[in-house]
Amino acid sequence: MKNAGILGSKKGKGGGYYLLKQPKEIAMARIIRLLDGPIALLPCVSLNYYERCDNCKDEAVCGLHDVMSRVRDASLKILENKTLKDIITKS
């Protein structure tokens, strides 16, 4: 998260990590991608980490590909519209 420009750090006594951006500016989708990688459940539907599926001959007619694309889109709709602020202020 430091290399991505979200966190900064300070060495020594009183040091540690701190946010470089306001929590309202940090989308949850970005945090998840930085920490865990793809949001998509299958590599063949990933937007940023796409890999062709070995088991599927044609993605255009694959039922699983269609379902997992919809799951990815629904997840992204939520995660791109929620920020770190939403998570830390939820009571």
Image (cartoon, rainbow, N blue to C red):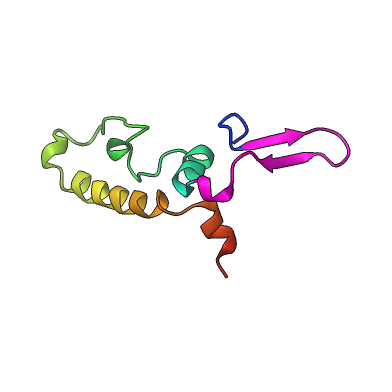
Q: Indicate left or right for 22 with 55 as reference.
A: right
Q: Residue at x 29, y 49 (%)?
A: 73
Percent across and percent down for residue 6 are 59, 37
Q: Residue at x 81, y 32 (%)?
A: 11
Q: Indicate left or right for 11 with 88 as reference.
A: right
Question: Quick check: is 14 in the magenta stretch?
Answer: yes
Percent across and percent down for residue 80 are 40, 48
Q: Residue at x 40, y 44 (%)?
A: 39
Q: Seen from this angle, which residue lies furthest right? A: 13
Q: Quadrant of residue 58?
A: top left
Q: Indicate left or right for 20 with 28 as reference.
A: right
* Number of numbered markers: 0
Placement of 45 over or under 76, stated as above or below = above
Question: Quick check: is 27 in the magenta stretch?
Answer: no
* Image quarter hosting the N terminus: top right
Q: 42 or 12, which is in the foreground?
A: 12
Percent across and percent down for residue 57 are 15, 33
* Image quarter hosting the C terminus: bottom right
Q: Seen from this angle, which residue lies furthest bottom? A: 91
Q: 86 or 42, which is in the foreground?
A: 86
Residues in magenta?
7-26
